[in-house]
């Protein structure tokens, strides 16, 4: 029982993580460029 709950939670995390990554990729493609870096107040 505990293994099936663990595997179910793991599968849900993988599916939701993939959906979040796809949304981010769509945002980057719509913007046309990739913004990389850190905030100026960090260093």
Image (spheres, grey):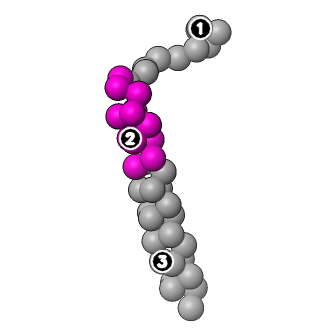
Element under label 3? Answer: helix
- Disc 1 + disc 2, Cβ < 8 Å: no
Q: Mark 1 points at which residue?
A: 40
Task: Determine which of the numbered discs, if any, sits on residue 13 in the image.
Answer: none
Q: Residue 7 carries which label?
A: 3
CA neighbours of label 2 inside 10 A, class few (<14), some (14 to 19), many (20+):
few
Quarter of image, res 36: top left
Q: Does the magenta stretch include residue 37?
A: no
Q: Which of marks 2 and 3 is in front?
A: 2
Q: Nearer the viewer, mark 1 or mark 2?
A: 2
Residue 5 position in % (x across, y down): 56, 82
Question: In the image, what residue occupies the spot 47% across and 17% down?
Answer: 37
**Quadrant location, the C terminus:** top right
Work out whether 40 lies above or below 16: above
Q: Is mark 1 on a helix, strand or loop?
A: loop
**To which residue does mark 2 refer?**
25
Q: In this view, does 29 lie above or below 6?
A: above
Residue range in magenta is 22-33
Q: How far apart are marks 1 and 2 (CA)?
A: 25 Å
Residue situated in front as seen by the camera: 40 or 2: 40
Q: Give the side of residue 32 with respect to residue 38, left or right.
A: left
**Residue 14 drawn at (x, y percent):** 44, 63
Count how many numbered circles sit on residues in the image. 3
For mark 3, does the 10 Å Cα neighbourhood hold few (<14), some (14 to 19), or many (20 or more) residues? few
């Amino acid at each position: 029982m505990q293994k099936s709950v663990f595997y179910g939670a793991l599968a849900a995390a993988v599916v939701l993580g993939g959906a979040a990554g796809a949304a981010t990729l769509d945002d980057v493609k719509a913007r046309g460029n990739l913004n990389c870096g850190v905030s100026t107040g960090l260093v």
